[in-house]
């Protein structure tokens, strides 16, 4: 059986919870090395996942130079994604980079073009595309049941959901706050569903009005004096062709909103998802009446699923499996590096627009 050799950089929340755990159980993957600047994290991962004969690197450059590795997974704070991806690609590795692809669009473009020139694959950790709700909504779009989609909402409004571990609250490490945390997922889901990754302008605003409201957070307290990022961001994004996406992102807001969700409005029907992978509702006119359909959704589509048990909780495993299958088949991954460029362009433009009070024009990446 053909096996690929993997190295994982960053043994924190997602490095262990999605990457090491999924690679460890995949029949076509051999996890040969891990890296973390904190050796205790590596020791913990080694113990937790019983990683026998694993190589441990404290410097990511050494892992990238390791000739035995075919594929590198990057699970470190956002601002490190660029330099680590570039180092891996330049050393002939395929790269799975966690979201967001980068914190600057020029970096995101360079990463995509470097992968292309090197003949290597690049994917991004947007496992939410594999939710059955998202796949169901996509099937409606592809069958033309919504008509022309001219409005959408990319939603990640958490009443309380401030990530208090790691570097999420430091701009120099996370690139920003909620916009570089939750917004990439909801923007990716929405643009994927619309089949349109071409934003042309953004008008937006970021705020930190709730910075001191530390109570009630499921992930514990934080020190507001150590946070220099926004807790909320809103934006109106115009896409090529004229459709509008409204972005609503917050990790701290007094609103019963939807986390990791999306809503599409078309000329024939509309569809939304009530919260993360929540109940899908289709609204349309049937027999001259307004109806709302709440379909019983089947597990993710067979074509997207390989070795893993088919259930929604395993969307991360399905994502990793899909990536491995693409590498083995020598085809483009389902989540392409290119798709990440639009996400970064939008977020970067929300910050710019918030500073200037003006809409920001974007040149879509072709
Ligand atoms: N796909 C998802 O749903 C999802 C969920 C959570 C996080 N993420 C993304 O994953 C990344 C990591 O997030 P996390 O929550 O796992 O953070 P984390 O803080 O739990 O883990 C980051 C790890 O990187 C290590 N690290 C930091 N600098 C390093 C360096 N120079 N060299 C080697 N290791 C280094 C840290 O020691 C830590 O162990 C972020 O980009 C985040 O946006 C994605």
Image: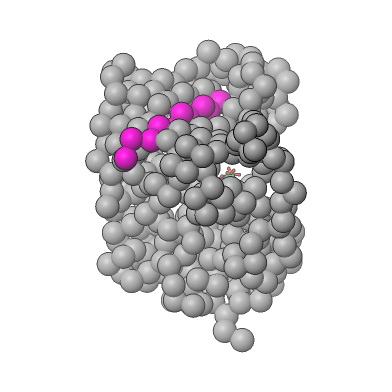
- Residue 248 among magenta residues: yes
Q: Position of residue 120 (x, y in %)?
A: 37, 69
Image quadrant in which you'd find residue 279: top right
Residue 41 horizontal side relative to residue 343, left or right: right
Q: Residue at x 54, y 77 (%)?
A: 4
Residue 308 horizontal side relative to residue 328, left or right: right
Where residue 36 appears, as percent x and y from the top left, is 55, 54
Camera-nearest residue between 196 and 5:
196
**Residue 8 against residue 178 in the figure, above or below:** below
Q: Is residue 37 in view from this perspective?
A: no
Please identify the quadrant where the N terminus is shown.
bottom right
| Image position, residue 83 (x, y; %) | 37, 52
**Residue positioned 71% across, 57% down in the render:** 299
Asked if the magenta segment contains residue 151, the reply would be no
The correct choice, above or below, for 54 with respect to 211 in the image is: below
Residue 323 showing in the rendered view: yes
Query: For the point 38% across and 35% down, which residue is it?
Result: 243
Residue at 51% x, 35% y is 265
In the picture as drawn, the residue positioned furthest to the front comes out as 287
> Foreground: 142 or 366?
142
Q: Toward which corner of the image does residue 24 lie, by quadrant?
A: bottom right
Tell me which segment is drawn in magenta: 241-250
User: Which color scheme is applied?
Assistant: one colour
Judging depth in this view, the residue of 82 and 334 nearest the camera is 334
In the picture provided, is 286 more to the left or to the right than 269?
right
């Amino acid at each position: 059986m053909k096996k690929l050799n993997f190295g994982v950089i960053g043994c924190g929340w997602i490095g262990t919870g999605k990457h090491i755990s999924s690679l460890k159980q995949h029949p076509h993957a051999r996890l040969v090395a891990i890296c973390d600047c904190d050796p205790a994290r590596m020791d913990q991962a080694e113990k937790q996942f019983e990683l026998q004969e694993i190589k441990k690197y404290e410097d990511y450059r050494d892992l990238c130079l390791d000739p035995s590795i075919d594929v590198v997974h990057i699970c470190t704070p956002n601002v490190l994604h660029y330099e680590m991806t570039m180092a891996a690609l330049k050393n002939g590795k395929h790269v799975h980079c966690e979201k967001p692809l980068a914190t600057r669009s020029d970096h995101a473009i360079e990463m995509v073009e470097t992968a292309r020139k090197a003949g290597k694959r690049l994917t991004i950790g947007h496992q939410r595309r594999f939710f059955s709700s998202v796949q169901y909504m996509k099937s409606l779009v592809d069958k033309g049941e919504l008509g022309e989609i001219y409005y959408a909402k990319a939603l990640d409004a958490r009443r309380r959901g401030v990530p208090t571990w790691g570097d999420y609250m430091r701009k120099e490490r996370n690139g920003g706050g909620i916009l570089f945390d939750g917004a990439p997922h909801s923007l990716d889901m929405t643009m994927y569903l619309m089949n349109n990754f071409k934003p042309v302008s953004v008008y937006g605003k970021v705020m930190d009005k709730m910075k001191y409201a530390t109570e009630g957070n499921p992930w514990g307290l934080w020190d507001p004096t150590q946070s220099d990022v926004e807790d909320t961001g809103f934006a109106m994004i115009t896409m090529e062709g004229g459709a509008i996406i409204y972005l609503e992102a917050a990790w701290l807001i007094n609103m019963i909103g939807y986390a990791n969700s999306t809503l599409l409005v078309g000329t024939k029907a509309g569809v939304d998802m009530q919260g993360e992978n929540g109940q899908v509702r289709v609204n349309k006119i049937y027999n001259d009446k307004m109806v709302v359909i709440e379909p019983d959704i089947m597990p993710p589509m067979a074509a997207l699923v390989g070795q893993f048990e088919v259930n929604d909780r395993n969307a991360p495993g399905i994502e990793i499996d899909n990536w491995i299958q693409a590498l083995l088949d020598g085809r483009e991954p389902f989540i392409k590096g290119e798709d990440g460029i639009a996400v970064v362009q939008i977020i970067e433009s929300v910050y710019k627009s918030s500073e200037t009070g003006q809409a920001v024009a974007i040149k879509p990446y072709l």
